[in-house]
Image (spheres, coloured by chain):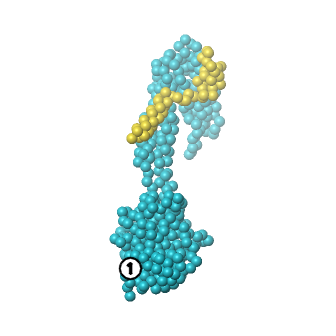
Amino acid sequence: MVARVVLVVLVAAMVGAASYAAMRGVWGESSSVISTRAGSPGGGYGVGGRGVK
Amino acid sequence: MSTARASSFNCTECGAGLDALGGGRVRVHICSYCGAELDAQDDYKVLAKYRDLERPASPFSIGMTGELWGVGFTVIGTMAWVEFHNGKRWEWVNHQLYSPTHGYAWLTVEDGFVTYARKQRMASSPTSLSESFIENAERRPSVSFGGQSFRYYSSGRIKPTFIEGEFNYRPSLDESARYVSLLGHHQMLDIIESGQEREYELVSLPDQAATLASFDVPAGRWPKPRGVHPLQVYHQSPFATFARTVFFVASAVTLLIGLMLSGSGQTISQSETVGISRDVTLPFEITNAGRLTEIEIWANAYNSWAWFEAELLDGEGEPVAEFERGVEYYKGSDWSEGSQRVRTRLHLPPGTYELSINNTQAVVDWAGGTEATRYQITVSHGVNTTFWLWITAVVFGVLGLAQMVGPVVHNTRRMAGSDWSDD
């Protein structure tokens, strides 16, 4: 019984985490946007971005 | 002439003391010491002599007693059998069993499995499957027996190689037999044809450990099963069944959430549709942190492309980001490539922003194309990245399917010993 409860909790947690990541837009940024904000550490918004202009 | 059975007697050939364990219907008794076949119905008169036979390996021996499904049995005889086919050799050992209340039966040891067989009085329909019928059948043949259907498993010719102890018929080393094995749900049906006789046996797979323990087989002599026996039905653990259900439900729920979240996002600012030569400046405000903002450029490029440059300023006029995007769309009679919409997504902290976009180039590079003449900018906020949900749904679906692989593999292994081929 404990194993079943643990499984359901784990699965529910994974569904919840996936939903949260989807709604927060995790890894959803476009890859070719260049951050130009002063003090940006480079990379900016883009995954593989080309750094601070 | 009938002879009263004694519990023990001396071999009429060699004088060795022998136990009579098999009740009043024993026909012959093959002496364990000299191999003389004695007529149990006629004062143990010597009928034949079997010498220099190689004793087969078996965890059971004559005189052992044990229970099968609550019925007490005594091992009274041993027969070894061999089958040759295509250069391969199969061997197994049959032990005749006797129960004062349930009569005679067989305990067989083959491939490390112990099975229980009992002769049946009724016949199957059809009564048998001939070699030619099996050879020419397009589908796996089956017979009906006792209201159950049994599907063909294997067939061949077999020959005894060793005889010892008591039997309720007269076995012979010189006589070969043809068998057809058919697989039912919980039992196998063996049709055995020898000379003019045809016999039917139902074979069951008893609890292996309980059977061996009941017959007091020492642990060191327990046979080691090889592979999966055809009668071993797959038993999935209740937890595995539960897990499979949970995984499939989770997969379905995740898909549903994904469908609900896909395409969402609230339009917070939209420009007019303007001529391609005009610059667009579009203010918007972000109020919620941690959500994706999407900037979509639409242009009416057709078999052509148009290039745009964008700059994003914050409320104090400081540049936040810049990017370039190309709209390219090509279409043939039965194909299309690209899109008239291109999207850029980025995380922006709450605040006011101003987006400036201008077209830098518009080129027709395909037959029948038209240059983009108009474009429009739309800014949305709260856009979701649903691929997380698609990935999770696939993972749970695969995990659920994995719970179904076990039975498939098991059933494949169950049928591995069958000589039937669909080809």
Residue at 45% in and 61% down: B216
Q: What residue occupies the far left of the structure in this picture?
A: B101
Q: What residue occupies the far bottom of the structure in this picture?
A: B1
How many numbered marks, from 0 up? 1
In the rendered image, the quadrant that contains the N terminus of chain B is bottom left
Asked if B137 appears above or below B308 in the picture, the reply is: below
In the rendered image, the quadrant that contains the C terminus of chain B is bottom right
Asked if B141 appears above or below B257 in the picture, the reply is: below
Chain for numbered disc 1: B
Residue receiving disc 1: B5
Q: Position of residue B403 (x, y in %)?
A: 47, 48
**B198 sits to left or right of B83:** left
Asked if B288 appears above or below B407 in the picture, the reply is: above
Q: Amino acid at mark 1?
A: Arg
Quarter of the view holding residue B211 = bottom left
- Chain letter matching colour yellow: A
Asked if B363 appears above or below B176 in the picture, the reply is: above
Q: Return the residue nearer the eye: B108 or B269.
A: B108
Q: Position of residue B128 (x, y in %)?
A: 44, 76
Q: What residue occupies the far top of the structure in this picture?
A: B316
Is label 1 in a helix, a strand or a loop?
loop
Q: Position of residue B347 (x, y in %)?
A: 53, 23
- Chain letter matching colour cyan: B
Residue at 38% in and 84% down: B3
